[in-house]
Image: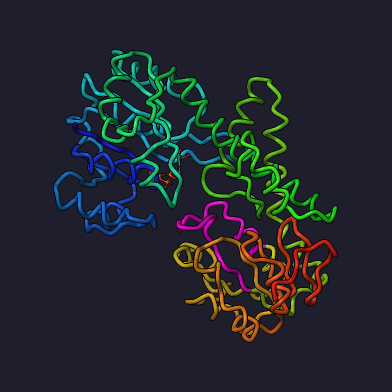
Amino acid sequence: MKIVVVGTGYVGLVTGTCFAESGNSVTCVDIDPQKIQSLKRGEVPIFEPGLAELVGRNIAANRLSFTTDINEVVPQAEFIFLAVGTPPRSDGTADLTSLWTVAEQLAPVLPHDAVVVVKSTVPVGTNSKLAVRLQELLGRECDVASNPEFLKEGAALEDFTKPDRVVVGVRRAEVGEKLKSLYLPYLRTENPFLIMSPESAEMTKYVANAFLATKISFINEVANLSEQLGADISDVRRGIGHDARIGFQFLFPGVGYGGSCFPKDVRALASLARQHDTPTPILDAVDRVNLRQKEIIFDKIRQHFGKNLSEITIAVWGLAFKPRTDDIREAPALGLIDRLLDAGVQVCVHDPVAMDNVKKSYADKLTYTESPLETLRNVDGLAVMTEWGEFLHPDFVQMKQSMRQPVVFDGRNIYDPAVMKHHGFAYYSIGRAPVQDGRTGHDNSTPDPG
Ligand code: NAD
């Protein structure tokens, strides 16, 4: 099948490449000429495990190409996937400017039987409005379908090729069948292909993200309470997670959720609810709790070092909003860095793949280091903000020798307080008793392994 994907970011590039991999002829379109130039050379501008190899293979097989010229490629297309960004406006609503721009560009060249598929996350009702707008421009009806994307950055190829489910929202059953045949290579494990109305499909995407964000804010809220009450959230998590109705997924306490989806989608859904005079106090609280949680490591640093932080240096491990991606949109690490810089702290940072993105906005305000250990030279404390694999088992002896003061603020609970105590660190984590000067704050801590 001939496919055009408009918007070649995290979602568009993965979508286009995976459809090419299953034998389709795919052209990815973007307005960013630099991005398209590098993709034409087989250079992938984002970090996503396995993607560069797949892009290279499909370019070589002539199944995948790139262009900035939408007019050139749409006339031959059977499906046009829209995967442009839908960023948040300051009032929380989704900014659909790119989507409407593409609609205007598409109309003059849209083939008669092509299906326009909205993959971007858009407010409920957008597919309908798009169908109406295209009809105005074309002077005839055209098929518009919703096909929200559920991939996770860092595991995007796996998620796309082995989806838990594929959701499509259509007005006509034939359109659902056409889309099903396109997705068939990825439905071989009997994962469901769910056909519903465009409104339900649009809503499904927001509700999925809002629910996952709710779990994160919930566990963070009770983690903070556990810490105050002398309970250990890791034990509490084990205690609840074995209940099959609760489970363990997305119940990791930490420094709050970030990324390009959860914060914006929770706010967009809440804004949509306000527009329809329907209160959503849970959604509002999820966002508020998350914003508060993003401050937690800075608060712990201030509690440890006192109000005047201008003499200290802090190392930050992990800049991306989560491991296995270079995406720094709304990353908790950046909020911490801003706070530290405002307080006059010197900041050294390390991230395996996201440093170039951070350099674009922070330039020489930060010291960038090539290895985690190098970051620790003469620092007064370390903040762990992303749980990259390479941070999980560091050499604590070398770490302690490098640091001016052995203080670790673990925003992801990746270390064992007993081990940190054994190595003589002051250690602060989320929802667990602090280890101060080799002593635990509560006397009900886990036993010392040493
Ligand atoms: P992105 O910012 O990485 O990519 C968007 C791309 O669209 C950019 O390359 C941009 O240059 C391009 N673009 C903007 N206007 C354009 C135009 N008029 N014509 C052609 N290209 C244009 O965004 P993303 O992370 O890929 O997200 C895209 C959509 O998918 C959003 O609605 C997002 O909410 C949703 N989504 C994202 C994820 C994710 O993990 N990133 C997951 C599921 C859904």
Ligand 1 sits in quadrant:
top left
Picture residue at 82% right of the left edge, 70% below the top: 307
Picture residue at 60% right of the left edge, 35% below the top: 211
Q: Is residue 18 above or below residue 181?
A: below
Q: Quadrant of residue 353?
A: bottom left
Q: Nearer the viewer, residue 276 or 203?
A: 203
Q: Nearer the viewer, residue 119 or 139?
A: 119
Q: Residue 380: horizontal and vertical position, in percent?
A: 70, 79
Name the quadrant of the C terminus.
bottom right
Q: Residue 175: horizontal and vertical position, in percent?
A: 30, 18
Decide whether residue 120 is among the magenta residues: no
Q: Is residue 128 above or below residue 264?
A: above
Q: Residue 426: horizontal and vertical position, in percent?
A: 75, 74
User: According to the image, what is the colour scheme of the structure?
Assistant: rainbow
Picture residue at 82% right of the left edge, 71% below the top: 306
Tell me where the magenta segment starts and ends, as one range.
Answer: 315-338
Q: Is residue 270 above or below residue 226?
A: above
Q: Is residue 335 above or below residue 402?
A: above
Q: Is residue 12 left or right of residue 437?
A: left
Q: Nearer the viewer, residue 264 or 247?
A: 247
Name the quadrant of the N terminus.
top left
Q: Residue 95: horizontal and vertical position, in percent?
A: 51, 36
